Image (cartoon, rainbow, N blue to C red):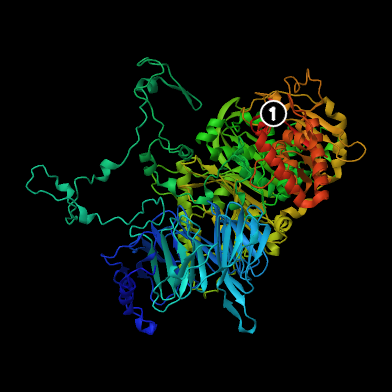
Amino acid sequence: MGEYSPSIHGTLDAGLESSLDPHLNSSLLQGVELDPEALAVTVPEPVHLMEGMFSELHTVVSEVGIPVTATHFDLQEEILWMGNHRGHATSFFGPTMGRYSSFQVHATDDIRHIQSLETGVLFLSKCNLKCYTRGGLVMFDYPMEEGADMHSLLMTDNNTLLMGGLQNYVVEVDLNTVQETQKFTVEVPGVAIMRQTSRFIFCGHTSGKVTLRDLRTFKMEHEFDAFSGSLSDFDVHGNLLAACGFSSRGLNGLACDRFLMVYDLRMMRAVTPLQVHVDPLFLRFIPTYTSRLAIISQTGQCQFCEPTGLANVADIFHVNTVGQLLMSFDVSSSKQALAFGDSGGCVHLWSDAPEVSFNDYSRETEFALPCLVDTLPQLDWNHDLLPLSLIPVPLTSTEPLLSDWPTALATPSPRRAPPVDPEILRTMKTVGFIGYAANPRTRPRNQVPYKIKDVELDYDNYNQVPESPIGRDEEPHLYMVPKKYRKVTIKYSKLGLEDFDFKHYNRTLFAGLEPHIPNAYCNCMIQVLYFLEPIRCLVQNHLCQKEFCLACELGFLFHMLDLSRGDPCQASNFLRAFRTIPEASALGLILADSDEQTGKARLGRLIQSWNRFILTQLHQETQEQEGPQAYRGASTSSLGSSSESAIGKLFGCEVENSSLCRCGKETVRSTLTLLFTMHYPEQNSQEKTIKEYDFAEILKKSICLEQSTQAWCENCEKYQPTVQTRNIRCLPDVLVINCEVNSAKEAEFWKVQAECAFNKAMQKEAMEPAKPKEPPPMPTEWCLDMEGFTFDTRAEDLRHVWIPLTLKMSISKSQGLEISSWPEGEELSAAEEAEGASLYDLVVTVPHILDARTGGNLVAHIKVGETYHQRKEGVTHQQWYLFNDFLIEPIDKTEAAQFDVSWKVPAILYYAKRNYHTKYDLRSKFKDMEYRVFTSIMKQQETHDGTKSTIKPSQMSVARITCVRGQGPNEGVPFIDDYISTQEQVVDYLTQYSGIKPGDLDAKISSKHLTTLKSTYLKLRFLIDTGVRFVGHGLQKDFRVINLLVLKDQVIDTVYLFHLPRKRMISLRFLAWYFLDLNIQGETHDSIEDARTALQLYRKYLELSRGGGNDEVRKVLKGLYEKGRQLDWKVPDSDTGDGQGSLKTAAVFPSVMGL
């Protein structure tokens, strides 16, 4: 470096003196715009850089007087990044240092570390990590914990990084989910610098120490006490670690140590310290042919030396900082360029070659597109065929364009039905309301002049996705659906559901339901029934002998929802029983797979039919008297009364139907109805506008329905026009309403009524005096403020709202049923209560979401009561929630009543009488009879046999469940070994993996202990509720197929006991061979053998843990994985598979568990 011409440095000094005088007052530069191009200093043309010798190539100014705190060479593109003390980032392109992008990263904090990625650039400040595109658009913003003081980050792989600073922890963040995955504790004062090799993660501490940590566990393996004062920088290359820092000088404080500490990583000890001639602040290995070190001082002196040799004074050169101090330093990945940032806002680029490349293989950098107006082609006016449309001309004329068709020609008109043949009308005879006529034979049989196209604007037709993109553009409602209302799907990976982030969709403690099961369209109504407290207690207290009882299965499912703490459940057993009910099939409630996947099902009508079916089915099942008392519990319970079903008490309403013939004969009969259907007034064809109606008025007419129809009259002995009227004798505790908005006509009626109600609310608000502005609510007020919209909701929020949140209902002898809207927050007076009036609050709305892209879906708005919040969260309040399968989100009460019928069509409404649940016994009695149920099933299970049913082949079903005792004199002896009589047609027994042979599940010829799934389910449920711990291999999937929720502290899974993070799962067969010297699962699997093996493996794990603790277990597991890689995870002398993948493909498989 000493042989360089002094003119090079002289030229740089002269070029910077005028603008970077250190004695110049920085305040004088305020308001002065500096041209970055004018400040860029290039090497003069006649000067040629010598290969292998570093010299200054370029200097640019980012912001005058603002220190450059971080520099970084982009690892993908030819870009140099810098960040300054005020949180501003700037990038420069190529060796010419042309400004590429510039943007503000943080408002106040300085940028401390920069790291480039494939898709963006990471910027680390004191308490924040941000990712930007190279053009300056924000990709994500990740705030730290309060009190964090971050200094460095380290990319451990493409999607994971570590962040450390002056605190007692290091954070691991997953860049895919932008969430913290692990937090490692470190000693105070924290980690300021991090480096990584293939063996260790190196952490530099401000205490002067360098620690070597395990790549996987971050546990400290070695420690070097480098300096007595503090550490300023260190670097690692090959088997060498070099560090620079400060030494303690007693009362004189810290002094820069001119000895570099060098360590040999093969022997883990220090070698001879290296004395240098500058005060080192930064150091980097710049390997070319040797392990060369670059040492940089804060004043700009740079020295190159070998870490194992002596430093030469001739290898010192100087960065011309014009009196400023160096604040940052970086080396390009190609080792051809060095970058220095100083306290005056300058960035200096040094290189050892004039044609420098920052990376060995850089991708092309994207630049802003040039203005296309300036690049239009030249037009030849003399050319005869020149199209004048190439010249954009503004429209200045007021005359209509030729392409503007009149409305009359552009209005679509449907093709009308062909007229009826006049000969048919002439010869037709009418009997009642049916006409009969002979076929005039004017055209061939079963033919019409043209193919009639179905043009009915039915709302359920929107479920079908348009065939072309043009059709999608013609329906603007396709893009109106908010994200939280859209159909949610589970994205499966090779790990199944284990790595799917359900917490992203549900941050509450309530449990969602998985939608991937056949006929899971009813998930929203299952949630509705669960959050009605009397229904929940009723089905949980119900237990009968029927193999497929919806009330029993619903009780089991509700028990899982009670135990879950935010994790989703699945209704597989309930839907399995639902498919066996003949009435469900007859009503068309069981969908084919093709209808669900293509969105052809009319979900609006379907869920209303399902609502009627489930209430009727539960009413019948809870009234039945079959089965011993041990199955039913105490008959004196108000929910299990034999005289009347609790469903009838809750939803039932005694209805008086009267039929009056024109002969004067009147027939009256009484029935019990569980729900009512909305009936809308007929629109007169002459009236173009729809009249305004109140919801309470329409509801009253729908309940007390009066209509004319043809009915049989016993007096006249023929069908006669009769007037049928309906009246109710009592009010139900819960009023269930099917909205029946199934066509465009009803939807238009609902839309017009909502607009009228909204206009009326706006007029009322305009007439009222302005209220004083209230302070903004607290952040948590959404869960505490339960006032009605009459008081605290703005009229603007009532758009698309027609239904009231509260109704007042009463029955009087003089006037009959009276219904009116009522302010939600008000109570009835004593006189009104004495007259028998009741208030009904809206608690459930179920809308049908129209989305042609996904086929549509069903969601539920549910007002969750105080008891549910008390059990889940320990607080007492009421709150509305949106339930969209496994997506659960709190919403405002007005959103629950809003129905924009262009995409959100009302289907079901539930109104509950205020404080209705106080009259019901809400105590759970299931635990009191569990032991009796368990004993009764053990005695009677031999009597059950199997029937046949068909499901889709890919669905898995449990075939055998085995439990062995885990301790005591009978350890290893099975006490449950049940073969499950499945109702589903088995496509493949997969005997090699399941051990089940054809005929084992046939009740007529099987020699096995055959029983029903419900029987064995109750045995396992008894064991779980009594706190038994389960030991097995791969239990998580087994319990999922059985549809049982088991708390984590009750499960000991050998899959995870013998597993290292980020490694593969090991099969039971290989573990048994390695640890127990057993050769199991030779030809087929035996669940008893597997359960005993899992138990022995657990004993082996306890033995290893007691012998040497976690260190001994980790050492043994490393040996296990090493042996497995050598053998390709196959047990020697065996040609069969390891069985690890069998559970994923088998149609039937055994559940293996030990007790």
Element type at marker 1?
strand
Q: Residues within 10 Å of mark 1 (few under 14, many from 20)?
A: many
Residue at screen point 50% across, 51% down: 483
Query: For this view, does 404 lie left or right of residue 739?
Result: left
Q: Position of residue 554 (x, y in %)?
A: 71, 40
Q: Is residue 700 above or below residue 71?
A: above
Which amino acid type corresponds to the residue marked 1 in the rendered image?
Val
The residue closer to the viewer here, 353 or 741, is: 353
Q: Is residue 281 above or below residue 1080?
A: below
Q: Is residue 741 above or below residue 139?
A: above
Q: In this view of the protein, can residue 874 be seen by the observer?
A: yes
Q: Residue 5 sits in which quadrant? A: bottom left
Q: Position of residue 1057 (x, y in %)?
A: 74, 45
Q: Position of residue 214 (x, y in %)?
A: 65, 54
Q: Position of residue 132 (x, y in %)?
A: 45, 59
Q: Is residue 297 above or below residue 78?
A: below
The residue closer to the viewer here, 496 or 737, is: 496
Q: Residue 712 sits in which quadrant? A: top right
Query: For this view, does 443 lie left or right of residue 409?
Result: right
Residue at screen point 84% across, 26% down: 942
Q: Which residue is mark 1?
A: 1148
